[in-house]
Amino acid sequence: MKTSWLKITALMLAWSSVVVADEAKKQPPPSKNLPLSGEVFQVAGRTAFLIPAPGQPGKTKGWVWYAPTLPNLPGPEEKWMFERFIAAGISIAGIDVGESFGSPAGRSLFSALYAEMTGPRGYSTRPVLLGRSRGGLMTLSWAAENPDKVGGFAGIYPVCSIASYPGVANAAGAYGLTAAELQNRLKEYDPTDRLAGLAKARVPLFAIHGDIDQVVPLEANSGRMKERYTALGGSMEMLVPKGQGHNMWTGFFQCEELVRFVKTHAGGR
């Protein structure tokens, strides 16, 4: 009788494995509209992308890590600078971590992409992180935790402070905390309070941020980051276009200085 039950159990386990495998086959492959031709794949169950630059023997495979990789991003606005990165031998990659606001869960997914890019794909261990708007909060939070793995940070009106955007109350759920708990631990999580490691590692920073931005105010974000980073001995370049807010002004996305910064610090040819 015992032998029969063991056989039945083994058959049930084998059948379950087949069902799981069949269900996996039925899942559609990840898809994403990219501004340039690239690969869309999964990392840790999340949609990721890679727009590869043509490689050259003996050259470091430099890359830019773009965020936020939400369903509609990166968008056509990024095409101009992406083309210039590709021409310089610098690839672009990213992973959709949802509205994670720089939380530990979001950072762990970033670490999974980093392992994928620097491991089997053979890319540089020190990419430049490029954060657009709330993508700044995602990339800066990971960078503060991994300063030795960052070649530089560039931001387009980047969120640098949880308290500024999305606000402590709105971010608390992503951190698995109450608003009061997150407020009490804000210095533990807010990127502008965690810049010392980046400064010690001499990671260069760059931001372009409009002076009338009401969604992500300059003073509470890029301005605050520059002030604190400089005080720590770090280097940060900041451009402040006059009369520009949190908008789709072409100058934010066709910024020669940003492209120069990335080309200088991301490697490639």
Image (tube, helix red, strand yellow):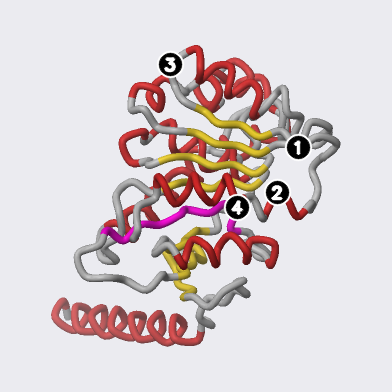
Q: Which residue was labeled with disc 4?
A: 68
Residue at far top of view: 231
Is residue 178 inside the magenta stretch? no
Q: Residues within 10 Å of mark 1 (few under 14, many from 20)?
A: some
Q: Which residue is mark 2?
A: 252
Helix, strand or loop at label 2? It is helix
Q: Amino acid at mark 1?
A: Pro
Quarter of the figure with the N terminus: bottom left
Front-lying residue, 199 or 32: 199
Res. 241 mark? 1
x and y percent of residue 81 in the render?
58, 60
Closer to us: mark 3 or mark 4?
Answer: 3
Q: Are marks 1 and 2 in contact (CB under 8 Å)?
A: yes
Q: Earlier in the sequence, mark 1 or mark 2?
A: 1
* Start-end of magenta stretch: 60-69
- Tell me the tag on residue 233: 3
Does label 2 or label 3 sit earlier along the sequence?
A: 3
User: In the figure, residue 79 lies in which quadrant?
Assistant: bottom right
